[in-house]
Image (spheres, rainbow, N blue to C red):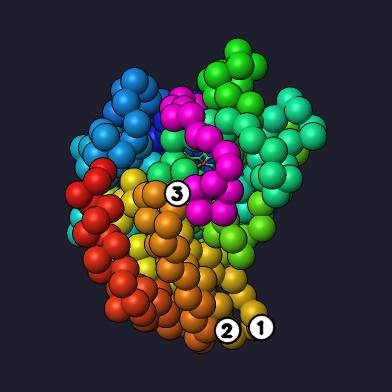
Amino acid sequence: MHIRIGTRSSRLAVWQAEYIQTLLRQDGVTSELVFIETKGDLVLDRSLSKIGSKGIFTQELEDQLRDGSIDIAVHSAKDLPSNLPSDLSIIAFTERERPNDVLVSRDKTLSLSSGQSFRIGTSSTRRVAMLKHFCPHLTTVDMRGNLQTRIRKLDEGQCDALLLAYAGVHRMGYDDLIVEHLPIHEFTPAVGQGSVAIEVATFSLDKEVSEILTRLINHEPTAACLRAERAFLARLEGGCSIPSFALAQWTDDQTISLTGGLVSLDGSQLLRETFTGVSNESPALGHALAEAILERGGDELLQTIREQL
Ligand SMILES: NCc1[nH]cc(CCC(=O)O)c1CC(=O)O
């Protein structure tokens, strides 16, 4: 069996694709990487929320799944929209890396909780809004580009620190630059953060091949958590430009706890709830959480956010 793997060509994307190749090789499955550029890689002068986030890192890969140029597409689970068209599906989520965000800087004395004032580079609406909520004394600088580009901008002095996903920083070998791990009960991560998703064209991939790939790549405990988080996001109809967050975690061998919510762009309002339920009904858990958040004022909050973006 030989699999053509579609991937973006950023260093993190290549790390992810090579990780998938390693998992496949365990069972003698050979593969090759097909590099595909997405709108998110090309348009670097505008913030993600202004480009219109839906599928900006995924569309071109999906086109090649459909026309049969590749067998699977590898994405950061976080970049994959929560509502997939019916001809595409996810057949695996890899075991999640630690899901939290980290503060990255050359200055070891920096800390979010210290009360010092400094500039943080980020292009994520969630991170900007959360910083405004928890750390109003800090300023943010809009910063696009892959990890290496952002660290170069940090070194050029365009900001004093970056707020990033631990998973990407660790995978790229920048652990030495981490000055603080942010607590997930405050800075709850984005849906899917830390896991890698495998997407296929539902009707063109052979069913038997698809089952083998799932067996080799999918980590079911992670997948159950991501189904809860993604159901939450789907109900909010949020892409990655909406400042929403959710993290599901196992509490015992049958139960998942899902924490998630929304924060207003100016940080003044933060809605967060935790729901617990049985793991095999995790999408229902995500749906229930979304309903609760919408009912508690999330509905109006979302409307305001959409008008402002
Ligand atoms: N949207 C960019 C993106 N997509 C996935 C990751 C990090 C790795 C991951 O969450 O799996 C990042 C960078 C970041 O948020 O710091």
Q: Amino acid at mark 2?
A: Thr
- Which quadrant of the figure has residue 261? bottom left
Q: Nearer the viewer, residue 31 or 299?
A: 299
The reply to whether dot 2 and dot 1 touch (C-beta < 8 Å) is: yes
Q: Tell me if residue 195 comes above or below residue 165 in the rendering.
A: below
Q: Is residue 205 magenta?
A: no
Circle nearer the N terminus (3, 2) = 3
Q: Residue 295 at x, y = what percent? A: 30, 78
Residue 240 visible in the snapshot = no
Mark 3 vs mark 2, CA separation in Å: 30 Å
Q: What span is in magenta?
A: 131-147
Q: Amino acid at mark 3?
A: Ala
Residue 45 visible in the snapshot = yes
The residue that mark 1 highlights is: 252
Q: Nearer the viewer, residue 151 or 213?
A: 151
Outermost residue toward the top? Answer: 156
Circle nearer the N terminus (3, 1) = 3
Mark 3 vs mark 1, CA separation in Å: 32 Å
Q: Residue 68 at x, y = what percent? A: 26, 38
The residue that mark 2 highlights is: 255
State which mark lies toward you, 3 or 2. 3
Q: Which mark is residue 129?
A: 3
Q: Nearer the viewer, residue 249 or 183?
A: 183
Instruction: Name the element at disc 2.
Output: strand
Q: Is residue 267 left or right of residue 296?
A: right
Q: Residue at x 26, y 43 (%)?
A: 309
